[in-house]
Image (tube, rainbow, N blue to C red):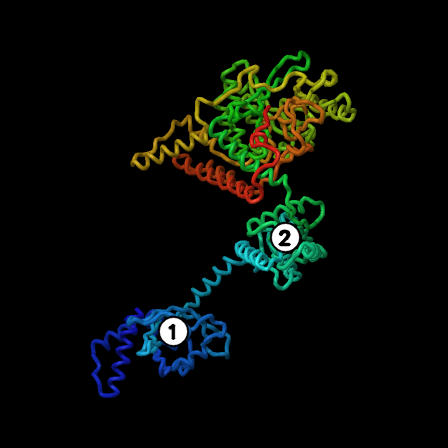
Amino acid sequence: MVLVLSSSLQQRARRRSQDKVGGIAQNGNQEQTLDFIARAVEAIGEAIYCWDIATDSLTWSPNSAAVLGVQDEELLKTGKAYATLLDRDNITTRYDAVMHSAKPDTGDGVPFSIEYMIRPWGRERDETAWLEDTGCWFAGENGRPKLVYGVIRRIDERHNSDQRLHFLGNFDPLTGLMNRGRLGEALDEAILNAERENSSCAFMIASVDNLPVIADAYGFDIADEVIRKVGERLQRVARGGDTVARYSDAKFGLILHDCRLEDLQIANERFLNVANERVIETRNGPVWAMLSIGAAILPEHAHEHNGAMSCAEEALAEAVAQPMSTAVIYKPAHNRISERALNARCAAEIVNSLRENRFTLAFQPIVDAQTGEPVMYESLLRMEDNDGDIIAAVHLIPIAEKLGLIRLIDHNVMELALETLKKHPQARLTMNISGVTAADPRWFDRIIQMLEKNRDVTDRLVVEITETVVLKELEETKRFIAALRNLGCLVAIDDFGSGYTSFRNLKELNVDIVKLDGIFCDKLSENPDNQYFVRSLTDLARNIGVKVLAEWVQTQEDADMLREWGVDYFQGYLYGAARIDHPWPSPRLDSQPGFLSAARDEEKAISDRHSAGQPPVLEPKTRQPRRRTHESGEEDSTALRQETDDSGPAASFEKPDEQAPAGQDSGQEVSAEDALVLGMSPARGNEPASDASDPAAAAMAEMAQTSTRPEDIMAQLDAELASLREVLETLRGATDRQVQTVPGETEKQACCEAS
């Protein structure tokens, strides 16, 4: 377009010059073509021009003043006059694009395209206009630019849209601060400058800890107002060259340049004081914001922004755990490094065990308190290691909870238990169901469907649910218990006494058995306080007609005391440890492939049929519910204890929250250091872990409510597995950056503690 206009204008200029000296007469057809082009340009709101650099004269199409919004047409006659319309903040101009061009003219002209802003009214008004200037310049005999031909159009709307997109891509719309993406770039630059200058900088994350409470009490609009004002306060006390950014919902990221450790300690106090020293006035009244800070010195602890953010997040987690608003500066911890290395290996082991059907069960007897004869057995999780040995799987449970695989393990254990009940008609089993499974409607239906298909064995199955979870999700748990009882299952409340179940709640739950928390039954004869507590719990349960089972029964003296108080069942090392060969061999699902490998094989088969142009083969309906049940990868924040031995502290390696007292031989001891590395708490802890982010859970929840076609299910499972691989790569990456080996232990010793 520009070339055509340039040629036409060039011809007109030549004819005008020739006419002045009596040259060639104008060609009518060419004039008609030029007028047609000029009208077309006017119709689309563009103006064309010719700039003769030697004379500095500008020749415009008749509509130029209207397009540019210029009132004084004298300003369009020369390049110098036109330059007075340009805004002073322009990065480039037409003069720069033409006169400073590095490209030579080889005869076809040199194209250019620039954008700049003009002030149509000059300096008299603030009105501006954004223009796109596209054209070609042609050189004279000396090779320097001589003539410029171009087209100009207004781009105000496009420019505003581009500016808006640029702002949203780099800044937070609520606070106007830098967003996390731009913060990462700025942080990399700060670290690079610190390394170049052999100095240090700092990165901190400041979190408004009580923002969820504010949003719940006052509304989300007031929470937004608090975030905005906290950001303003942080900006006020930040130094001139420092950066304050919106890191996430309730968090701010701050980059402190040229900052040493002692400087960071002072800065932490300054930022805490400005946020906490007085209330924040909002339109709904005063609000108190509680701030916690996690910070890290750079490049001492990280050399790029991801590592720096990770260090600051770890320090922040420690600060938030403190009772008062505080600031914590990151320090490397070897136990965290070892734990990450262990996480990466164990996560892979979980996936391989599920894929290869290497999970199995051990059985521990539960005896009648009066006769001492076994009446049922608890199903405890075991796995086969790479050498073919059956070992405890307790080390995998915390990792499974973090990565969202705990429900899959839960499902696998139920399959194994049902398989045992079908093969051994005399078997009567108990098994743990994770608390979130019991309270999650999506998994509620899956578990119920499994049991409905095995109605002939459900009357020999007792399902255990942890008391602390029951209290958190009372209504959903009541519905789950009612459904289990309708199918013929008995229901037990596990770890009774660890929570605060009231008489009314226990009665409404309509359970069949309560299992007294073993921590109260261990060495009962030596502890008067526990004697009073256990007796009270037993009386409470018996008053509403619920059977009582005592865990961790270790001595005959304790058993006699419990029997006298009316306890119905005993479980503990006094009556037998969990075994994989008695009274039945450990169940295996070898007759069918592990569901992860089965999913992979089925996906390949579907892909092969699709490549061959063949329609997919639908599986029998009897298989579809089972596959759909398998293909959920949601995280269970409740401590799953299918691998747990309720025989007492001597079997402490079976249950992370029931550690053995020192001096007792369980056949496999776990030190306090090992417990820390494995994610076990030395103190009792049945509280659900925080589950703020669970990509596997979200993906599988959506799958449960969408298509049931095999090819769709396989695609969704593939997405879930890809998410898991990303988590594993993140774990491995974090480990590789900080440690090469786990000191003091071999891989097998760290991952697999033999039962």
Residue ID at (69%, 21%):
542
**x, y percentage for residue 339?**
60, 38
**x, y percentage for residue 232?**
63, 60
Q: Which residue is mark 1?
A: 98
N-terminal label among 2 and 1: 1
Where residue 592 sits, quadrant-wise, is: top left
Q: Do the residues under discs 2 and 1 have CB atoms within 8 angstroms?
A: no
Position of residue 580 relative to residue 93, above or below, is: above
Where residue 473 sits, quadrant-wise, is: top right
Q: Which residue is mark 2?
A: 297
- Kind of residue indicated by mark 1: Val
The disc label shown at residue 341, or none = none
Where residue 494 sits, quadrant-wise, is: top right
Specify whether 371 is left or right of 67.
Answer: right
Q: Which of the pair 664/555 is nearer the observer?
A: 664
Position of residue 196 relative to residue 148, above or below, is: above
CA gap between label 2 and label 1 equals 49 Å
